[in-house]
Structures are given as C-alpha cells and as structure tokens.
C-alpha cells in the first residue's frame, strides 16, 4: 500500500461533502465550510469542475488528481471517478463516499511512487515538461518536483522526437475481380475462428456483401446493397470477411464508415482478425481516419507552448504536449487523449489546438513531415481498410484534396445515420459565427494575439511579391472582407449599431425572428426560428447588399486561385517541392472558401424570389441558457440524399448501407420501399440489392417493454418521481432518455441528491461538466450508476452486460416541430413520416438494452397515450405491457424472467390508441 500524500483531500457528491485532513481524519462538512477550507489550503480533489458544480462554487481550485494522472500517465485510459482512479492504479475501490478522501491521498501517493520508480514507462520528457509547468504555476509542480529526477542527458523535445512519415507511391488501380460465395464463406470461417458456432444469417449476409465488390458494368452506376442486419448476427465480421478478401485479391482499399466512435473502436479491434497490426514493410493495413479537426495540429501546439496560451490554458498545452509524444495517432477527440482532459480547462482549449479553421499551411509548416493529419492521410492511401466516419467520407467525396484517395468501395455501417450526416454535410448556413471565421481566414485576427493565426497576405507573402496579379487579388480580397462581421458583432447588433452589410443583414434576421416568434415564451432561453418567407422589402434589400458584398470577396479569391494555378504550372526557380505543396494546399482551401461564399450568395439570392422546392430555408437565433450565441440564415436540402447520391454514390463502384434499423417496421411488416427511397439510389437510377438477417436474440424471454400509463404528460414532479423510483427499483443501471434538455435538467435537479444518499449515483448530459464519451465510460464502469441524456445517448451507447439493465424514456419521442421538420413531414407523407421517425428512434433506444445474448432488461416508456401503431418498432415477440407505475416498479424490481412472464401475462396487452395524430 503506497504511503498517502499528507495533504487535505476533499470530496463532494450529491450525497454530501467530506474533508480528510493531513493527519488522516475524515469529517462531513457543509458546502460553505468546504469552500472555505479549500480556499485556505489547496486540497486534493478529483475532477475540479465537477466538485465545483456540486459545491455551487465555480472558482474552486486545488490539486486535481486528474491533472496529475494526465501528466504521469499520458495516453493511458482512466475513468475519472474515485472507483475508476482506484482501478487504474490497482488500489482498492472506496466502499462509500466518505472513504473517497482517503483514496485521493493514497492515489496521489501511489502516483508519486511511480515517478520515483525505474519502470515508469512515460518518464521520457517529464522532467523538461515539469520545468515549463513550474513556470506556468501548475499547482502540482511543487509537489512533483522532488519526485522526478533530472535526466543525465537533455531530453529531446516533442517536435524533434516524433517520427517522420514517408512519402509513398500512389497505389495502382484495384484489379477487377469476382469473388465466389465459397471463397467468401471460407474467409468468414477463417475470421470467426475454428470451432465458432455456425451462424447462417451471418453467412448469407457476408455473401450478399461480397456482391458489392463485383466489377461495375456501367459508368456512374455502382453496386448498392441495403442490408438490414439484426443485432447480434455478427455483422462486423460479416462484412470484414468479403472486404478483406477483396482488398487482398484486388489490392484495393475498402472504406468502412461509422457514425459513432464506439463502433470505430470495435472495428479497430475486430479487424485484427483479418489483418496484422503492421505489414512486413512496416506500413499499416488498417488505418483509422477522421476529419482533420479531430487531430492535434503541431503548429498550433508549438504556438500555444511558446506563449500563445496563457493561464490555465498554458498548463493544458503542456499536458497535451506530454500526451502527443505517447499518442498512437494524435487523435484528440475519441482517440487516446482522455476525453475528460479538455473539460478541466477553459472552454475551447482543445479545439484551439486542432486545425479547426483550415489554416493549415501544409508544406510551409515546419512540422509538416511529422504532422499527425498528413500521416493519417498518407497511411490511408496505402491501407486495405480505412475506418472513417460518415461526415469524413462525404466531405472527402465532396472536396477531397486528392482524387486518387477518394473511396470507391464503401461500407456505411450504422447506415440509418447516413441521412443525418448528409443533412449536415450538404447544408449551408450564413451565420455571424461562420462569416467571422471567413473574415479571420482572409484578414487575420483583429486583436494582436500571439501565435501564428495570420491572414491570407501573410500566408501567401512570397506569392504576392513574385506575382503582381496574385498580390493585387490578395489585397482586393482583404479590402472586400472588411464587409464581413468582426469581433463584437453580437453586442453591436444588440446596441443597434450593426456595421457593414453583413452585420446589418444579421440585425434584420434577429429582429424578424423575434417579431415572428410563435413559441409563446415556451422557448425562452432556447433557439428560435422563423421561415424565410414573406420577407419585407427592406430585408430583401439588405440581403441583396450582403450578396453583392460577398461577390466582391469571391471574385478576387477566384482570381487568386487562377494565379496560384499558373504559378504551379509555370514554376519559378524558387518554387521547390515544399513550396509547390504549400501552394497546392492554399489552392485547395481557396476553392473550398469560394464554394462556401458561392453557396451563401445563392442562399441570399433566393430570399426575394420564389422558393426552390429542393431546399428549406429559415432564419434563426441560436440561444443557450438565454444567451444568444449565433444568428443567421440556414438552408438544408429537403432530401439531402440527392446530393449524397451524386457526390458519393455515383462515382463509387460498390456501396453498402447496413444497420439493425435500416428498414422501418410498420404495422404491416418490413418497409423496404422507404429504405430504398432513403438510400438516395432513386436519384441515380440504381436498383439496390436488399438483404435481411434477423437478430438471434431471445427478446421474448430477455426483454420487456413496459408502457407506464399513469404519468401525465407535462407533470414534471410526477415524471421526476417516476425516474427516481425506477432507478431505486432497478438498483441503478438505468439509462434515462429525454427529448428536451429542459426537462432532463429539472428531473436531475429533483432526484440526484435523493438517489446519491441511497448509494445510486446519477450522472447527466447537459448538467455535469463532463463530455458525453466520458459519461458513458463512467456509466459502464459502475453498475449502480444511472445516466440521463438526450439524442447522442439514444444512438451511441454500447454498454453490454450488467451496467445497463433498464432504458427509461420520458415519453414518445415526437419529432421537434421545427420548420425543417414541417417541410419534410409534408413531403414525406404527413403523419406516416412522423411514425417512421418515431419508430426508428424507439428501435434505436431499445437497441441500447440488449447488446449481447446474455443481456436482459426492461424498456420503459412513461406515456399515458402510446399509439399502438408505434409498437412494431420493437423486435417481434418482445412482450409489451401497459401498466401503472406501481406495477412497473414491481416488475423492474423482480427483474426480467421469461418463465414467470409467460405464465402470468399475455405477450401483448395493448389498448387502442388514445391520441389520434
Ligand atoms: S501541417 Fe498543417 S495541420 Fe499539420 S501541424 Fe502543420 S499546420 Fe498543423
């Protein structure tokens, strides 16, 4: 047992607050006393922002063990709870809240012991980092200093330590091959391993997938497969088998695209069955690839380390630098950087270290050859399997830098999310926040901030001095960009002092949106919107002026693009390979901006005239907690699968969309028609193949759907009471799903303390200052914990086993009646469209409950009026029971038992619909 660190330790939960003094005696104390104590002497705490929220004292500071952990064990996973910390350090977990302060002291002692040990794996660079952290006044620096010895030889700093990537030749075209069924089956057997149970559904599925890889017979007509794959059929290996076989035989690259990070992680591990970690030549056959905004930008980090970040953010930069030298791939969002690290520091610290705004200078960057983003891009060009996400695949197809790297064989797993991803990828939004980004990209930041954030002139200084026309175009763009909103625009709009055509237009958007607000105060504090129709003359005039101003920015940018192209084609002597790559990079980002401005112009152009039925346009003021944060005009495709079909499907050779909920199951059975319509294939006149494999899970005996009919809609105290009692009856392990953040917060506020006192911790999205991925980790780690959340949890939680025993929905998940929804509802068949949406949501939510054949549990909907026509959302044979809360609690407390149920209740016991649509 390590010696505890003799410093006071503070812990606060919903059940109370405890302080242990340096001498080892623990006492409970009031929040006020705790705040005073922490102000007197810095105390050991775990997750300062969370403790601060519990104490209601945002300025709380202390010695946060999570920061210490991040320093000593960079890139190592830890669930940020007392129990999680104990597990990560091999200590005994605390039995109760009052034992936590003692654990914090022991954990700190244990971590310091590691620093002294010869076997500390992450020692390299620690001493040097600590010197910088001392200067940055990191509270832990003084405590750590005596435990980390100075190395005999100077440590190399991160930027010289990271390996360089190698340039590699382009991959030749894949061979055109046919795979026969027996080969696919043999490959599947190889991957599932000898002795694995033979699953016919999985075999049929794998063979159907194999057909997607056949040579295409007509240009622009890819093979498309829509594959409904019930949970548990072994879908991943089912498609990895034909994919790996094709990649090996054809020497081509297969892209598997997912929506959630969970599935990416799972794919990474399952792909090990088909491919080794590295090939004989050291290259990687499997590469995970994400959007560039996910990765650490080394140039941004260097700026941050050299004074670009101050105060607490400077400490974050040092810890990120520690992590970067141990990271697998530099992925900051969902990779091996702990998700909780960013939440310990000022907002946007992590985002500022990524390349969010396309400011990359490519080969002009001193770290180009070590850049994580460039490394991932190069590795994926040589890979057999690229694991990506829907957004990246679509962005890559729409505006990828390199045609040769565009995916041609794509498997969209979690295919039911393709619509949503296409919806945001092909959207246009002219908002203040977007416009100010463009301004900064062209002009550079207004305030004299430290660091490299520079405008176009600085980035292309050499071009401007060499090529007069190019130089003039840069100047003209900078001058025209003065018309864009600048810092403080929201305040100026509030004060009625909008400056320039764009700010004036945004002022008019704001005024009109408030004028037409029909929410009757219901949306107080949240976003409001109004349709872009029947716009007054002065509004249309302002839109016209803004459109002209945008055109004045776009023209010189187009000219500049032409000049850059000319320079690359007729290269001057000074233009070496690096310079050429930099100009290529600049051309790419220019083209992207030119397209963006063009989309804004066409959006504005439409405002005065007849509306285009392909699009839905609206004006919106985005607010959070009654604070406005953005204002603008939005445009979505009525059906985003139309551009998806053109941009993604048409150029591909083979595409599959697969999911457990690809097809709707209406009262009349499986609905392939709407699945085909939603796939985008009708736009390119491709007839997709269809396949379906049913889940092998025994839903009849392992799950129950309980529809609780005595909680009235809108009765928040009753709703909160019901949640508390369900969580108590289940003994935790409840995932509570809400459609409105407001109600989630009220329910959490009413019940968290009561549950905590019963030893049932409750966590909540939008309440706890913890990122969603970490909340799920915490939930997974503690079978007595429960978690409340909204959409992201309904779709992305994969918690097999004991930790998730019950899913409780606050009601029927009706779609939010937004302007966009209204338009799609009208185009999609009215209430039938809504029914499909709701069934899909219910099916997704239900899907969280049974993740493996050994899982069992209850799915509860608190709804006095649950229409029968929605019940087909649940897997066939799942018992559905309408009952009172009391009866439901009894069933939850007893647990699911197929034997009891089949003896006692009918499999289906449904009233008639109570509310007509
Ligand atoms: S190449 Fe671009 S993304 Fe990479 S480190 Fe340099 S500036 Fe950042």
Image (cartoon, helix red, strand yellow):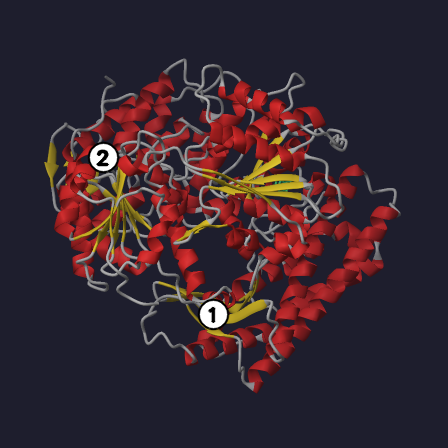
Disc 2 versus disc 1: nearer the observer? 2
| Mark 2 / mark 1, whichever is N-terminal | 1
Near-viewer residue (160 or 73): 73
Give the secondary structure at mark 2.
helix
Number of marks in the image?
A: 2
Indicate the position of residue 674 as horizontal and vertical percent values: 51, 55
Whether residue 366 is situated above or below residue 447 in the rendered picture = above
Near-viewer residue (374 or 180): 180
Question: How much space separates mark 2 and mark 1, taking CA atoms?
Answer: 50 Å
Would residue 301 appear left or right of 785 to someone viewing this image?
A: right
Indicate the position of residue 767 as horizontal and vertical percent values: 30, 51
Give the residue drawn at x 21%, y 41%.
761
Near-viewer residue (699 or 95): 699
Q: Which residue is mark 2?
A: 898
Whether residue 331 is situated above or below residue 624 in the rendered picture = above
Q: Which residue is mark 1?
A: 620
Question: Residue 625's quadrant in the figure?
Answer: bottom left
Disc 1 crowd, CA 10 A, few/some/many (<14, 14-19, 20+) = many
Quarter of the image where the N terminus is located: top left
Indicate the position of residue 824 as horizontal and vertical percent values: 50, 65
Evaluate whether residue 502 shows in this view: yes
Give the secondary structure at mark 1.
strand
Give the residue drawn at x 65%, y 27%.
180
Question: Residue 244's quadrant in the figure?
Answer: top right
Give the residue drawn at x 17%, y 47%.
888
Evaluate whether residue 367 shows in this view: no
Whether residue 537 is situated above or below residue 395 in the rendered picture = below
Give the residue drawn at x 57%, y 86%.
537
Would residue 840 appear left or right of 216 to someone viewing this image?
A: left
Disc 2 crowd, CA 10 A, few/some/many (<14, 14-19, 20+) = some
Identity of the residue furthest to the bottom in this view: 537
Split into quadrants, the picture shows ligand 1 in the one at top right
């Amino acid at each position: 047992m390590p010696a505890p660190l003799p410093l006071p330790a503070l812990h606060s939960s919903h059940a109370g607050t405890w302080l242990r003094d340096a001498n080892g005696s623990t006492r409970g104390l009031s929040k006020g006393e705790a705040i005073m104590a922490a102000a007197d002497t810095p105390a050991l705490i775990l997750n300062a922002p969370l403790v601060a929220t519990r104490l209601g004292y945002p300025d709380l500071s202390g010695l946060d063990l999570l920061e210490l952990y991040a320093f000593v064990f960079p890139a190592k996973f830890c669930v940020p709870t007392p129990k999680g910390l104990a597990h990560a350090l091999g200590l005994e977990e605390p039995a109760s809240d009052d034992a936590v302060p003692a654990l914090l002291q022991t954990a700190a002692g244990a971590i310091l012991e590691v620093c002294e040990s010869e076997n500390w794996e992450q020692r390299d660079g620690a001493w040097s980092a600590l010197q910088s952290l001392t200067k940055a006044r990191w509270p832990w620096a003084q405590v750590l200093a005596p435990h980390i010895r100075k190395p005999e030889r100077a440590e190399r700093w991160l930027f010289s330590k990271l390996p360089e990537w190698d340039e590699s030749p382009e991959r030749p075209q894949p061979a055109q091959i046919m795979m026969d069924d027996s080969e696919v089956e043999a490959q599947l057997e190889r991957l599932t391993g000898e002795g694995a149970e033979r699953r016919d559904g999985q075999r049929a599925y794998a063979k159907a997938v194999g057909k997607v890889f056949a040579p295409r017979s007509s240009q622009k007509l890819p093979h498309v497969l829509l594959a409904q794959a019930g949970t548990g059929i072994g879908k991943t290996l089912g498609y990895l088998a034909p994919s790996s076989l094709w990649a090996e035989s054809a020497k081509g690259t297969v892209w598997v695209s997912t929506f959630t990070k969970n599935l990416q992680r799972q794919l990474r591990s399952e792909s090990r069955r088909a491919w080794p970690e590295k090939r004989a030549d050291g290259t990687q056959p499997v590469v995970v690839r994400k959007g560039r905004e996910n990765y650490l930008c080394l140039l941004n980090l260097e700026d941050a380390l050299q004074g670009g970040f101050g105060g607490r953010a400077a400490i974050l930069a040092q810890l990120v630098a520690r992590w970067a030298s141990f990271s697998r791939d530099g992925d900051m969002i969902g990779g091996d950087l702990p998700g909780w690290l960013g939440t310990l520091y000022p907002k946007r610290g992590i985002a500022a270290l990524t390349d969010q705004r396309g400011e990359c200078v490519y080969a002009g960057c001193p770290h180009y050859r070590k850049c994580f983003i460039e490394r991932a891009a190069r590795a994926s060009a040589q890979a057999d399997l690229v694991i990506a996400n829907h957004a990246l695949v679509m962005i890559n197809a729409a505006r990828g830098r390199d045609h040769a790297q565009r995916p041609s064989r794509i498997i969209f797993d979690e295919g039911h999310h393709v619509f949503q991803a296409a919806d945001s990828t092909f959207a246009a939004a002219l908002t203040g926040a977007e416009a100010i980004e463009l301004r900064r990209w062209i002009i550079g930041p207004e305030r004299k901030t430290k660091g490299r954030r520079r405008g176009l002139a600085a980035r292309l200084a050499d071009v401007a001095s060499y090529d007069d026309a190019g130089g003039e175009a840069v100047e003209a763009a900078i001058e025209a960009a003065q018309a864009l909103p600048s810092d403080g625009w929201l305040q100026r709009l509030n004060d009625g002092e909008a400056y320039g055509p764009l700010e004036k237009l945004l002022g008019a958007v704001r005024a009109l949106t408030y004028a037409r607000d029909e929410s009757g105060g219901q949306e107080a504090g949240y976003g409001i919107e109004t349709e872009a129709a029947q716009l007054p003359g002065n509004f249309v005039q302002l839109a016209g002026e803004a459109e002209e101003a945008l055109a004045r920015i776009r023209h010189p940018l187009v000219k500049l693009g032409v000049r850059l192209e000319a320079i690359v084609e007729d290269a001057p002597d000074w233009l070496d390979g690096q310079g050429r790559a930099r100009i290529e990079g600049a051309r790419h980002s220019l083209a992207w901006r030119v397209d963006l401005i063009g989309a804004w112009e066409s959006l504005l152009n439409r405002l005065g005239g007849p509306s285009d039925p392909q699009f839905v346009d609206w004006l919106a003021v985005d607010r959070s907690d009654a604070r406005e944060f953005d204002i603008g005009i939005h445009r979505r495709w009525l059906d985003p699968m139309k551009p998806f079909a053109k941009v993604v499907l048409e150029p591909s050779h083979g595409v599959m969309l697969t999911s457990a909920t690809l097809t709707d199951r209406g009262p009349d059975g499986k609905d392939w028609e709407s699945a085909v319509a939603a796939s985008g294939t009708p736009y390119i006149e491709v007839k997709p193949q269809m396949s379906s494999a049913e889940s092998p899970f025994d839903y009849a005996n392992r799950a129950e759907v309980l529809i609780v009919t005595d909680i009235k809609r809108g009765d928040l105290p009753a709703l909160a009471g019901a949640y508390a009692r369900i969580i108590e009856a289940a003994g935790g392990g409840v995932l509570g799903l809400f459609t409105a953040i407001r109600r989630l917060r009220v329910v959490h506020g009413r019940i968290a303390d009561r549950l905590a006192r019963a030893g049932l911790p409750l966590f909540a999205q939008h309440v706890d200052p913890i990122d969603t991925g970490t909340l799920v980790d915490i939930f997974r780690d503690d079978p007595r914990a429960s978690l409340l959340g909204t959409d992201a949890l309904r779709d992305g939680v994969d918690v097999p086993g004991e930790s998730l025993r019950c899913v409780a929905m606050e009601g029927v998940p009706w779609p939010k009646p937004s302007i966009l929804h209204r338009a799609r509802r009208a185009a999609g068949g009215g209430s039938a469209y809504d029914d499909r949406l709701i069934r899909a949501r219910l099916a997704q939510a239900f899907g969280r409950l049974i993740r493996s054949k050994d899982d069992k549990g209850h799915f509860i909907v608190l709804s006095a009026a649950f229409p029968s026509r929605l019940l087909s959302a649940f897997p066939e044979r799942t018992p559905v029971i309408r009952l009172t809360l009391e009866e439901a609690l009894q069933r939850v407390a007893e647990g699911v038992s197929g034997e009891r149920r089949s003896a006692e209740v009918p499999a289906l016991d449904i009233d008639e619909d109570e509310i007509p649509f």
